[in-house]
Amino acid sequence: MAEHRGKAGMESRRFEAISGHLASNDRPKSAENKDKSQIEMRQCGEVKSVISKHRQEVLKWNGWGYKDSKFIVNKKGLAEFVGEKYRLSGMVLPSLVTWMEKNTGGDIQHTSPAQSERKPEDVPEPVTNGDFLKDVSELDISYSQDPLDREFHAHGHTLHEIFILREGTFKRVPDVVIWPSSHDEVVKIVRLATKHDVCIIPYGGGTTVSGALQCPEEETRMIVSLDMSQMNNILWLDEKNLTMCAEGGIIGQDLERELNLKGYTTGHEPDSIEFSSLGGWVATRSSGMKKNIYGNIEDLVVHVRMVTPRGVMEKNCQVPRMSTGPDIHHFIMGSEGTLGVVTEVTMKIRPLPEMKKYGSVIFRNFEDGVACLREIARQRCAPSSIRLMDNMQFQFGQALKPQAGSIFTSFVDGLKKMYITKWKGFDPNQLCVATLLFEGAKEEVLAQEKRVYEIASQFRGLPAGEENGQRGYMLTFVIAYLRDLGLEHYIVSESFETSVPWDRVLDLCRNVKERLTRECHDKGVQFPPMNTCRVTQTYDSGACVYFYFAFNYRGLNNPVHVYEEIENAARDEILACGGSLSHHHGVGKLRKKWLSQTVSDVGIGMMKAVKQYTDPQNIFGSNNLITLEKAKL
Amino acid sequence: MSRPEYEDILEGKRLYSDLGFSMETYDPPRYKHCKPRTPEKVKEDVLNSTRVLSVIEQLATETDQSEDELLSQARAMVQEMGHNLRMRSIRFFAYFLNKIFKTLYKKIYVNGDHLEKLAKMSKDQPVLLLPSHRSYIDFLMLSYVAYCYDFPLPVIAAGADFMAMKFVGTLLRNCGAFFMRRSFGSDRLYWAVFTEYVQTLIRNGDSPMEFFVEGTRSRTSKSLSPKFGLLSAAIEPFLIGSVYDITVVPISISYDRRLEETLYARELLGIPKPKESTSGLVKARSVLQEDYGSIHVCFGEPLSVRKLAEGRIDRSVHGLHPRHMSMFTSEEQTFVQHLAYQVILAQQKHMVISPWSLVAAVLSQHPQGLRLGKLVNEVVWLKKQAVGLGAFVDWPAKEDPSSVVKSALELHHHVVALGDNAKVTLNLPPQTRPKMETGMARKHRVMEEAEVRLMVVTGTNQLLHVFVRVALVLMALSGDGTKTRDEMFRIFMFLRRTLEKDFIFMPGQDKQDFDTAVQYLCRVHVLEEEGGSVRVSVSGKKLQSFLYEMFSPFLLGYWIMCQYLLTVSSDDARGSTTQQLTRGAQDMAATLLSNGHAERFEILSLDMLGNSITSFVSVGAVKRFKR
């Protein structure tokens, strides 16, 4: 077993991007205000990450997020969020347990605890390609065959994977974890892998929910998990062109924190930003909450370096646009680790906005809300972020209300007060809420805010305060921790997403929920499931819809299998209603079976042809997206 | 489906006041995603729909009409079309129908447990009620039944000819009827308005929607071939994902005796039907003095369109076009067609066969009448055959067969009489035949006689769907009597194909139909198989000859059409209209009958002669073109 080089910083820092959602509107000085004659191109130093090299030291080995942060049911039988990382940390959520019981059935007293610490002997023995490892050691590149390191790299965060961690064992895990520290090292590793016929699965933040990190069980070659976390430097920042270049392994929150210190932001904020990596964003076609201002990853990327078995692929210039045949970036974005590994990315940056303001609008029903979002999109005046939650998600938000805290001023209390005067006629079982985030120069923000609220009023929507908006965004990050609480109590849950033309949004939401409910019933789930959705992104021609789905699995022998069948049915329903296979989660292995229907057989053929040329030996053998015929390789 | 459990809904109401009945609480369930709206709002929504607006825009560029003109045309159309379902009218209607139905009918049987289940389902998805259509009474009856069971009252697609009736038109409209022009050819605006009207009602599930897959009332009492237009429009919201599912309910409404029996006989012979009018209805009041026996309303097993489409239809293709543009893939067209056939076959399955129908079938084969004793024996034998094939015969178990037959005769006393000599004969016009009768006069006499005889025929017709498959198999064996299965199947196929307009067969299921029929006939020892050949057993001869007599008039009618076509086809290059052909062939048939060369009056039926042309067109023997 190799020696581990240098110890990465263990000290975890507060996540600034999140606290950004919690802080007041006074922002640090905007870069715009700085003396423009300052250094235009700056060399940036090493970035100290909140995530450690051996991730299990900071992160849960069998659940979401930081080790210390989780929901528990305390001695009084109330839910509590413990830990130190979040604003919600240390708070008691008095109505959560009742809400869970009511909406998923069952009783919080029934527990389904996970297996305790993983024993190293439960992890499969590694397949070792001695020649390869010998060559890697000679290059003095850090690697580990420690079972716990290897298992940590064997999965992402689908329900299936978490369930295996809690109750079973993986049949196949990576045989070695390698931590390259530079682009050149990656080139060498890929060359050696090709030479010795070793399989590589790149590993960024490990937050995938498409099964992309799972090792193909039938893979007989040695599998390398190429952990990019040590390649997390910001290489340079170019203020003249407003771009920066960073290594692919940098974690979202580290990148954002460092850029913020310099007065900039990428504006790319996927919900996984705390843990996901820059290279991962590129490889999966990621989308950020604030894309209305900053764009999605495909709009942000200026230049990418990708190491493939065939060599390094990149453009020779960093220009805003070019007409040079099909854009090779689009071979990379969404390739999901099947063609190579992203080592360096040049991305657009923006000066930090002068003002950041939250808001919320309350609607009588979901239909009104969708109509309003559609109108806002038509007028192209969507704020940085706008999300419409359905009634159940609104109520869910209420259930997550802690006992105290200024930001948590009770919405319900406010509601009751206003109810009598202003909101008469709003049915608490129908109403839904849109949360808003405005960013920009002060006058712009105020003008936009006014315009959005005017449009909302045409759809009988009423402003419901900044705090409700802010809370909505804050909850995005903690909601991910809720699944682990559910799993402790026989509740499986998952989220899935799609994109859909505007005119089909309502039908899709209704039909998918209906399908989920009926499938649960047909598959013997004893309680009605919780299913809820939100319209989470708006575009000119459609929207992104995000579903949360949970059910109580007491009495079922194989809850994960049942869950998967139900999710498959829901995906069929989405496609039948004119929705896409995925807006931003990607395909991985989970959604492979629908890909040819989605992009046509010719489309699959093109992907295969690209793969065939770039990686004829299937070194990047994660088997995501497409299945290759064995004979050809 | 289990055997329907019928209950008589008139029982109890006889002791109860009509007014009280009409004032009962009526609080039907509602589709869970329905946003309640007024009939006026429905019309508004239709006019504001993308479908209608985009057609208006297109027409404005293609023709010299302005958008405003087109919009006001559309408004007029939707006004003409729209229902106006209102509680007050419903109560009035309930009062009125309760009164009338109690006078007309002895019993109204309904399998109410199914309707109660259906009421629960109607909360979860929009419902299509698809009844058989053999009488005006059908839709009145269904609304009445719905009211009795606290089931939401349907909106009903009715022919626009009703609309012209003063008062009644309005009343029907207020009770949920909406009107559809019988033909609107290529009027795109009308089609858009109508489609949108149907679909907005289904999408929002305001009320269950009722229409007749057969398109019009069957005068013959046989099921008509389905029409697909309205059904396609009604199913489309599911195909494009506007609704989660649609429940389709085949409904069979069976009559002991129809109100319109005489009218229908005249129509089939080509004596024009009076235009629907209120005064006509008032004149028809004498009709209301009669006894019409019982009615059976059977709600069939509900069909989930979603389940039927599973694995057959890829709905995601509709992601590629705007949803207001109707596009049906060929799989979807086939799907709708099969659904339509499935509905009609399900209606047939749950039709209740009245004793009259059996009596009529026997009478048809004895043009001169027969003794009551023989009639009863034959009827009992026939009943056994029908029951064997799965028919539900409304035969009181404990009653003496001859009294059942007698009451059937009594119910149809306008057609048949039981003489003092215990001989059963038809009430034919007096047979005063002059010595030197002209051909014309003879034919006239034939037509008069035919009016009565066709009423017997329509009685028989209710029974044909039970026997048609086995009859075609037995007819395939009629020649030298012994054939291989393959030879039989070829003839069966030919007959089935030829008669596919007169009888309902599931497209593509010919082999199954054949095998099932052969299997049945072997099981009951009508057929014997030996050394690869099949023949009719000695005991099976009776069934064979009875069914041959039952179905041969169709072959005869088709043969006459062939003969007639041979006389006209060569001399006129401009061709003939269907009407000219059917009339011509009918005239030829009348001559044959008056000469005594033929004795089955079925061949005078314009309906059958028309069907023969359609059949010849579909096999390519005759060509249809527009002049």
Image: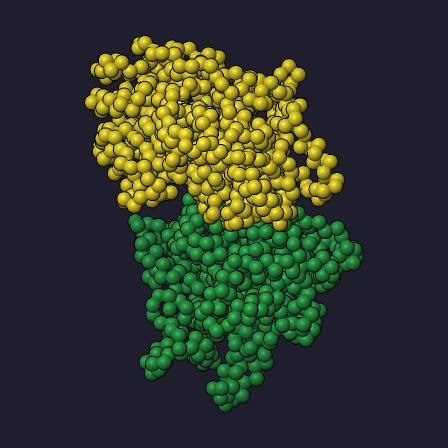
Chain colours: A yellow, B green
Tell me what residue is drawn at x 51 percent, y 65 percent. B56
Percent x, y of residue B119: 63, 47
Q: Nearer the viewer, residue A552 or B474?
A: A552
Task: Name above or below for residue B607 compared with residue B111.
Answer: below
Would residue B387 be seen by someone viewing this image from the given angle?
Answer: no
Vertically, is A597 above or below A467? below
**Residue at x 47%, y 60% (from the top left corner):** B228
Residue A471, relative to residue B19: is it above or below? above
Report whether A545 appears left or right of A95: left
Residue B541 image-quadrant placement = bottom left
Q: Position of residue B351 (x, y in %)?
A: 56, 56
- Judge by depth and name the residue closer to the eye, B558 or A618: A618
Q: Quadrant of the C terminus of chain A?
A: top left
Identify the residue at horizontal 51%, vertical 49% (top origin). Answer: A378
On the image, the x and y values in percent for residue B43 come to 61, 61
> Residue at 52% of width from left, 38% of height from top?
A440
Residue at the extreme left of the image, as rendered: A195
**Going by the image, does A421 lie left or right of A546?**
right
Q: Is residue B224 left or right of residue B427?
A: left
